[in-house]
């Protein structure tokens, strides 16, 4: 009969109640089988403003619309998103990057996410060589956030490119179509349902 590592009892007698092993506590097996990961959208906010950096090498903090507060997050009009309830969250930001002028050369644009003022994850980069191009860029992350953690995003025109480009909303000419935001943030809370 097989035995669990470090045990003298048969595996079948302990498999449902194992709570220790390999130097750290484990969830009882029967409990993990009845749990599922649930999601709850806790924030969806968007900006419909043109957001252009002031020049080459000058980062602009991205705004996500008007100031608002709910049970989970506080959003400032400057784009800082402060966590009010600790937990595991899925963060999804979308940016409508466009070049607005600068007929010569290529614009190199980067977007990044920051947590408490320090970059987390990779930057997202695009090169735009025309004044008539818009590209959607995305930042996505799943992170544990503590109360007081502040999420921000920035866009920058790299000094190795043309001094043009930024975030632009899309406004359709056809009736009954909503505009497309220049920047939006959607945050979903992840939790175990017992």
Image (cartoon, helix red, strand yellow):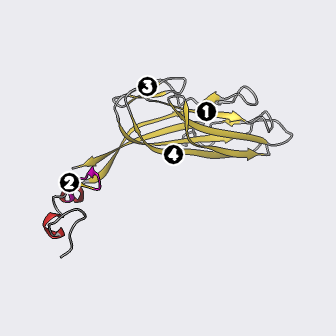
* Magenta segment, prevailing SS (helix, strand or loop): loop
* Badge 1 or badge 2: first in the primary sequence: 2
Quick one: SS at disc 1?
strand
Circle 4 Cα neighbour tier, 10 Å, few/some/many (<14 / 14–19 / ≥20): some
Quick one: SS at disc 4?
strand
Q: Which residue is mark 3?
A: 68
Pinpoint residue 14: horizontal percent, then vertical percent: 15, 63
Circle 1 Cα neighbour tier, 10 Å, few/some/many (<14 / 14–19 / ≥20): some
**Left or right: residue 26 compared with residue 168:** left
Q: Which residue is mark 2?
A: 19
Membership of 25 in magenta stretch: yes
Alpha carbon of mark 2 to alpha carbon of mark 3: how far? 43 Å
Which range is magenta? 22-29
Q: Which mark is residue 58?
A: none
**Left or right: residue 94 compared with residue 86:** right
Looking at the image, which is closer to me, 23 or 107? 23
Q: Which residue is mark 4?
A: 140
Q: Is residue 170 visible?
A: no
* Badge 4 or badge 3: first in the primary sequence: 3
Q: Which mark is residue 154?
A: 1
* Badge 1 or badge 4: first in the primary sequence: 4
Pinpoint residue 32: horizontal percent, then vertical percent: 24, 56
User: Split into 4 quadrants, where in the image is the N terminus?
Assistant: bottom left
Pinpoint residue 165: horizontal percent, then vertical percent: 73, 36
Q: Are marks 1 and 4 in contact (CB under 8 Å)?
A: no
* Badge 3 or badge 1: first in the primary sequence: 3
Q: Is residue 5 above or below residue 1?
A: above
């Amino acid at each position: 009969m097989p035995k669990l590592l470090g045990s003298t009892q048969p595996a079948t007698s302990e498999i449902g109640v194992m709570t220790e092993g390999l130097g750290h506590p484990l969830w009882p097996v029967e409990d993990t089988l009845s749990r599922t990961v649930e999601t709850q959208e806790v924030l969806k906010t968007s900006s419909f403003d043109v957001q252009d950096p002031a020049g080459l090498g000058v980062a602009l903090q991205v705004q996500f619309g008007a100031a608002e507060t709910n049970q989970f997050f506080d959003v400032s009009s400057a784009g800082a998103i402060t966590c009010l309830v600790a937990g595991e969250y899925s963060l999804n930001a979308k940016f409508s990057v466009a070049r607005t002028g600068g007929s010569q050369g290529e614009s190199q644009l980067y977007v990044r996410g920051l947590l408490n003022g320090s970059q987390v994850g990779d930057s997202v980069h695009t090169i735009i060589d025309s004044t008539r191009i818009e590209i959607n860029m995305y930042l996505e992350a799943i992170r544990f956030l503590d109360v007081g953690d502040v999420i921000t995003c920035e866009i920058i025109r790299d000094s190795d490119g043309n001094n043009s480009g930024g975030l632009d909303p899309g406004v359709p000419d056809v009736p009954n179509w909503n505009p497309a935001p220049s920047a939006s943030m959607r945050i979903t809370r992840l939790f175990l349902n017992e």
